[in-house]
Image: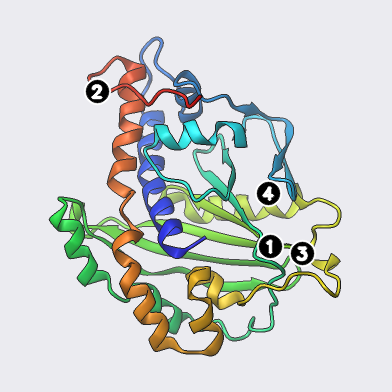
Amino acid sequence: MLLRRLFALISGLAVLAAVAQEKTETPPAPGEPKSFAEAIQQAGVKLVTGPATVPLGHVAEMKIGAGFHFVGADQLELFYNLTQNSRSGNEVGVLLSPENWMLFFAYDDIGYVKDEDKDELKPDKLMEAMTAGQDDDNRARQERGWDAMKVAGWATPPHYDEKTNNLKWAINLTSSRDNFQEVWINESIRLLGRGGVMSATLVTDPAQFKEHELAVDRLLATDFTYVAGEKYAEFKSGDKIAEYGLAALVLGGAGAVAMKTGLLAGLLSFVGKMWKAVVFAVVALGAGIAKIWNKITGAKGGPPPEQPS
């Protein structure tokens, strides 16, 4: 998944999570949904309720416990339409936890990612590349009447775990809506497999980030697994090899060539050019989730999109 699409998704989903959190903290009126999961069910999204084992595409699966809900592949189109967000086509499911954090899964069959550059994850250089072009391209957002968005440093610098073959990092994000005062956090996890990479994106309240980060770590360690034949350790000679390594995964696969060859200047140029598209979905997604609640609770607001046929 390109960095632009990933950042648009995770930034917008932070707005979604904040709305869900606010709703759950306010006692619901009679007939009003008591949680975000119940709200989207009332809007037409069919959920799998734990305990259950759910597929993540054709390459992995995950056990979900009691109190958890899962948006399966056949419901993702409606779910994303309701939240007015675009899709890349790689999405395989969304996990909704009873603690109001969400985990978004997508799989990219880019091939086997070699971890040879595991000791070359330079946080300062990666952040420089990630933030290049923000000011120039935020002007394009302002011309559309949209809030400016900025990356405000690492919440967790990129780290690779050789035991689990997982790459993880988290970024701080801010918005001009409150003059860049409030900070929210989005965590990205890349679970390496034999034929590609499963992306897991955590969206949660910043105040609960550390608590929920640990919960997700435990869940992925015990309840997520690639199916037989798709595990990283099952690589065989002749398998497809990804064209880039771990550092490029942090910035998005499209920056692979520049990152692979160490051409930071070229990568900065690439990120700068694409920043305009990085955060376009943010405001729309916030409006989308508000419409869901308005429709369900009887407040004024447009109806959610019809379920695709």
Mark closest to the chain's N terminus, 4 or 1? 1
Q: Which residue is mark 3?
A: 194
Q: Residue 305's spot in the image, x, y percent?
A: 38, 26
| For residue 80, above or below residue 262 | above
User: Does residue 71 appear in this view?
Assistant: no
Q: Is residue 58 left or right of residue 46?
A: right
Q: Where on the picture, by quarter, is residue 239?
A: bottom right
Label 2, label 3: how many angstroms apart (C-alpha)?
A: 46 Å
Label 4, label 3: how many angstroms apart (C-alpha)?
A: 21 Å
| Label 1 SS | loop
Q: Which residue is mark 2?
A: 301
- Asked if marks 1 and 3 touch (Cβ < 8 Å), the reply is yes
The residue sitting at 52% across, 25% down in the picture is 45
Q: Which residue is mark 1?
A: 196
Label 4, label 1: how many angstroms apart (C-alpha)?
A: 21 Å
Q: Which residue is mark 4?
A: 219
Q: Is residue 249 left or right of residue 287?
A: right
Q: Nearer the viewer, mark 4 or mark 2?
A: 2
Mark closest to the chain's N terminus, 2 or 3? 3
